[in-house]
Amino acid sequence: MTPTQSSVLKSMKEYDRIGKLKFLAKYSSGRPSKAHYIWHDEKPYSLKAVWAAAPIPPI
């Protein structure tokens, strides 16, 4: 399914709550995006990991 705005924001909150390294390990094999980031509230979020965490229902 396609992520929604609310599911992307929810995944970014999880990113902040558990920390970058744990979030990347959970959703993108520990690897951040090489070139693509989502900027929200002046903070970069790895697009690859946020997109993987955001589908409704979860994959």
Image: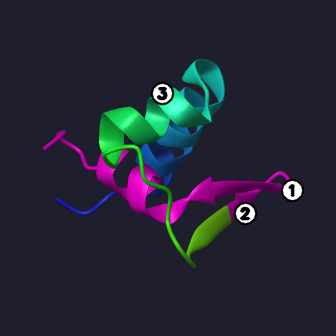
Tell which of 1 and 27 is nearer to you.
27
- In which quadrant of the rendered view does residue 19 lie? top right
Q: What's the distance in space between the residues labelled 3 and 2, CA to CA?
A: 19 Å
Q: Is residue 16 above or below residue 36?
A: above
* Type of amino acid at the residue the image marks with label 1: Glu
Check if residue 58 falls in the magenta segment. yes
Which residue does the image show at 56% across and 44% down from the upper left? 9
Q: Residue 48: x percent and y percent? A: 41, 62
- Type of amino acid under label 2: Trp
Element at badge 2?
Answer: strand
Question: Which mark sits nearer the N-terminus, 3 or 2?
Answer: 3
Identify the image quadrant of the N terminus: bottom left
Q: How far apart are marks 3 and 1 (CA)?
A: 21 Å
Which quarter of the rendered picture does the C terminus lie within?
A: top left
Circle 1/circle 2 CB separation < 8 Å: yes
Q: Which region of the structure is painted magenta?
A: 39-59
Q: Is residue 2 left or right of residue 21?
A: left
For residue 39, the mark is 2
Q: Nearer the viewer, residue 46 or 59?
A: 46
Q: Name the residue under label 3.
A: 22
What residue is disc 1 on? 42
